[in-house]
Image (cartoon, rainbow, N blue to C red):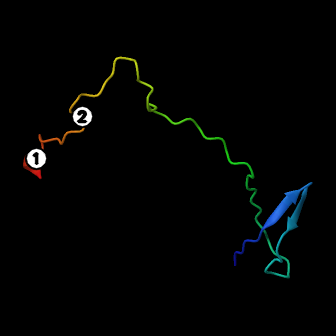
Amino acid sequence: MYAAIRAIYENGQVILQEPPPVIERSEVIVLFMQHNPPQKTPAKGVKIGSLAGKGYRLPDNFNEPVTDLSEYS
């Protein structure tokens, strides 16, 4: 049987926040969860606006429907 209960690790001790579901001797697995969220890794690829002023521009008809493939629909 597996059961999870909350605990706090502090000064080398695990302090249970709930009563354990077993009374006799039992093996346990202790997982340490980070309290501080991990730092975000920078996203790969092109960032919005990063090509501004570098000679790239969208064509005037960018938002127009594409009709080249209409015969396949």
Q: Residue at x 39, y 17 (%)?
A: 54
Badge 1 amino acid: Ser
Q: Report the front residue among 53 and 34.
A: 53
Horizontally, residue 12 falls left or right of residue 6, namely right
**Disc 2, SS:** loop
Mark 1 surroundings: few (<14), some (14-19) or many (≥20) residues within 10 A: few
Horizontally, residue 63 falls left or right of residue 47, namely left
Q: Residue at x 41, y 24 (%)?
A: 51
Mark 2 surroundings: few (<14), some (14-19) or many (≥20) residues within 10 A: few
Where the N terminus falls, by quadrant? Answer: bottom right
Of all residues, the one furthest to the left in this rendering is 71
- Quadrant position of residue 40: top right
- Quadrant position of residue 60: top left
Horizontally, residue 62 falls left or right of residue 20, namely left
Question: Which residue does the numbered mark 1 point to in the structure image?
Answer: 70
**Disc 1, SS:** helix
Q: Report the front residue among 11 and 58.
A: 58
**11 over 49 or under it: above or below:** below
Query: Where does the image place residue 30, in percent across and percent down from the top left?
Result: 77, 62
Horizontally, residue 8 falls left or right of residue 55, namely right
Of all residues, the one furthest to the bottom in this rendering is 23
Give the spatial CA distance, label 2 vs label 1. 17 Å
